[in-house]
Image (cartoon, coloured by chain):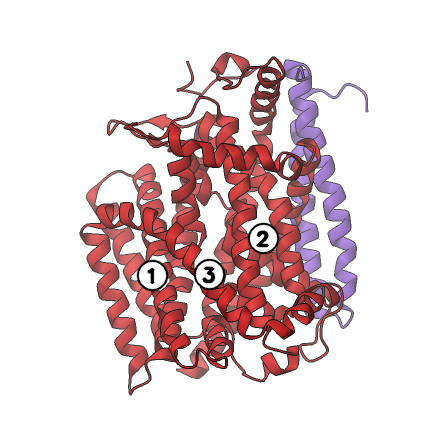
């Protein structure tokens, strides 16, 4: 079994390297271009973007459709998951403390990409018979590029990325965290089966109800995680200064204990950052399309703010939990990565073994709420390809099997490599489509700024603003 | 850059996209097959420059078709 896994990992690792380097050029290259074109809006307009996200609270009340704030909460629910705990720990263990610095940099660049894809999703959204709005990369590729074939290709890629890759990472890390907390014979197989059964119940049964519940519980859980992380940092408060210093010191200088070059730090930071905030992957665009707002730019600004909250706040506190343990060598001495490393570090404080159980609960909840989000996204995109029972059932089986297999493998490295390969392909394809359709976003942004300059508090958008509104079915 | 014909611009955009893919492959190849990993930064920097050209051509194409975006 171990030999087979080594062979599989070797093969996937080659594909992973090639796909990621291609994706790196598009994801970062275009992210920089968008940041320049938008004049660093994600930072210079930070207050306005935050205000839009918070003000949506009152805007959403009493509305049948999804408000901007509700869409923001749901997207944060999808974003905040295993990546914010296990992903950060893996980034530190494989890329050194400097990987955190690059996660920040790519979050700033990625928030411009998130803005672009979210605005596009809004412009090309479609109202379905259920009364709600649907959209995302498959929709804007089909309508904007006038090619259903590209739309189908993107939809299938999205199912593979989220329904297979991301589900695998979530379930693998959840199993590892549970095994770290509850040690007994055959615990991996038992927890893998448990996860598969719960996933099956959710996927074949009431995931809609639980999906709504998860959208409201995740922001609360994220807040609780931040509080728990701050408490954990307080136990090692004396090392906090060194933890922050390590992030900057190793940003351009990989610790010799890991080996490799600066490229290792940068790529690790990018991979784990993108896995966490999902900027440029097209997943958040699926959610951004569902909100009922007056101007697409508003949703873009809110989602770009979400990327920054995810990485600069949630991921950073996790990083500080790990790094405040002590020297990098002492952290590596645990010989673990992912959620288990976080458990190792926190359980070494006065919290003791209780930390293992608390982290296992966080991981379990985050893994399942994220999996629900990924399944919903996968089903929606599968329905875009072919809307029948067979397709939906096929996706359900794929999701459940992926969750079970990843839990049994229980090797974070292999599962991360599989997920990263799909993620890289998805990011490259989505970013090229966004670039090809970017004209519509810049026209909408110019219109938004014109109205704001004219003193209009609530700018409204119509498709007449676009020089080419072919394929835009809403915004009359 | 003078006036580029529409079809030519499309071809240039596609070419710039393919070059970006090839530079990504070159970067991965260098990383996997040479001792000096830092050499991989050469295709990366050229790749970023190529992406700027890729985006410039997309903008150029639409500016020619619909005119510049009014601020």
Identify the residue at image location x=25%, y=50%: A210
Specify the quadrant of the image occupied by residue A171.
bottom left
Give percent across and percent down for residue A11. 52, 69
- The reply to whether callout 3 and callout 2 are in contact (CB within 8 Å) is no
| Whether residue B15 can be seen here | no
Which label lies toward us, 3 or 2? 3
Q: Residue furthest bottom?
A: A185
Residue A312's disc number: 2
Q: Secondary structure at mark 2?
A: helix
The residue indicated by pointer 3 is A227
Q: Where is mark 1, residue-wise?
A: A365
Crowding at mark 1 (Cα within 10 Å: few <14, some 14-19, many 20+): some
Quadrant the N terminus of chain A occupies:
bottom left
Q: Label 3 vs label 2: CA separation? A: 15 Å
| Distance between the alpha carbons at the discs numbered 2 and 1 | 22 Å
Q: Is residue A249 left or right of residue A147?
A: right
Mark 1 or 3, closer to the camera: 3
Q: Is residue A376 above or below residue A419?
A: above
Q: Nearer the viewer, residue B9 or A173?
A: A173
Q: Which chain is painted in red?
A: A
Mark 2, other Cα within 10 Å: few <14 / some 14–19 / many ≥20: some
Asked if A232 appears above or below A76 in the picture, the reply is below
Q: Is A243 positioned to the left or the right of A400 in the image?
A: right
Which numbered disc flags the more N-terminal residue, 1 or 3? 3
Tell which chain the image draws in purple.
B
Q: Secondary structure at mark 3?
A: helix
């Amino acid at each position: 079994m171990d030999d087979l896994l080594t062979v599989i990992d070797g093969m996937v690792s080659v594909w992973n390297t090639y796909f990621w380097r291609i994706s790196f050029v598009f994801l970062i290259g275009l992210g920089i271009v968008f940041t320049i074109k938008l004049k660093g809006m994600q930072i210079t307009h930070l207050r306005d973007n935050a205000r839009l996200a918070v003000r949506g609270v009152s805007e959403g009340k009493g509305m049948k459709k999804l408000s901007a704030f509700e869409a923001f909460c749901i997207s944060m629910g999808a974003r905040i998951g295993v990546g914010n705990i296990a992903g950060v720990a893996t980034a530190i263990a494989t890329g050194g403390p400097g990987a955190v610095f690059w996660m920040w940099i790519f979050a700033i660049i990625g928030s411009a990409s998130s803005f672009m894809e979210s605005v596009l999703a809004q412009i090309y959204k479609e109202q379905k018979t259920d009364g709600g709005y649907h959209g995302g990369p498959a929709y804007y590729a089909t309508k904007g590029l006038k090619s259903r074939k590209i739309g189908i290709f993107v939809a299938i890629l999205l199912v593979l990325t989220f329904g297979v890759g991301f589900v695998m990472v979530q379930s693998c890390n959840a199993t590892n965290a549970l095994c770290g907390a509850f040690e007994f014979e055959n615990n991996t197989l038992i927890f893998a089966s448990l996860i598969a059964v719960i996933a099956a119940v959710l996927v074949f049964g009431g995931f809609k109800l639980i999906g709504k519940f998860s959208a409201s519980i995740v922001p609360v859980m994220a807040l609780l995680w931040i509080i728990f992380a701050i408490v954990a940092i307080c136990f090692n408060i004396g090392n906090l200064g060194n933890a922050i210093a390590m992030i900057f010191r190793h940003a351009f200088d990989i610790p010799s204990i890991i080996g490799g070059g600066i490229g290792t730090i940068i790529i690790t930071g990018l991979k784990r950052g993108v896995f966490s905030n999902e900027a440029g992957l097209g997943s958040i665009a699926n959610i951004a399309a569902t909100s009922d707002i007056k101007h697409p730019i508003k949703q873009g600004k809110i989602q770009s703010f979400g990327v920054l909250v995810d990485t600069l706040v949630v991921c950073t506190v996790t990083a500080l939990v790990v790094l405040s343990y002590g020297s990098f060598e002492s952290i590596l001495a645990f010989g673990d990565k992912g959620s288990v490393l976080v458990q190792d570090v926190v359980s070494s404080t006065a919290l003791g073994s209780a930390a293992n159980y608390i982290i296992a609960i966080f991981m379990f909840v985050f893994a399942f709420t994220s999996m629900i989000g990924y399944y919903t996204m996968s089903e929606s995109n599968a329905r875009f390809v072919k809307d029948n029972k067979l397709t939906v059932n096929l996706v359900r089986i794929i999701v459940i099997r992926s969750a079970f297999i990843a839990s049994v493998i229980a090797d974070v490295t292999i599962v991360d490599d599989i997920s990263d390969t799909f993620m890289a392909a998805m990011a490259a394809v989505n970013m090229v489509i966004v670039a090809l359709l970017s004209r519509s976003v810049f026209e909408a942004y110019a219109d938004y700024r014109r109205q704001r300059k004219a003193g209009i508090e609530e700018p409204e958008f119509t498709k007449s603003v676009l020089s080419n509104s072919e394929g835009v079915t809403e915004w009359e | 850059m003078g006036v580029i014909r529409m079809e030519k611009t499309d071809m240039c955009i596609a070419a710039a996209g393919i070059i970006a893919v090839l530079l990504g492959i070159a970067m991965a190849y260098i990383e996997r097959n040479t001792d000096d990993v830092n050499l991989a930064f050469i295709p990366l920097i050229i790749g970023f420059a190529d992406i700027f050209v890729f985006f410039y051509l997309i903008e150029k194409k639409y500016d020619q078709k619909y005119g510049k975006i009014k601020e």
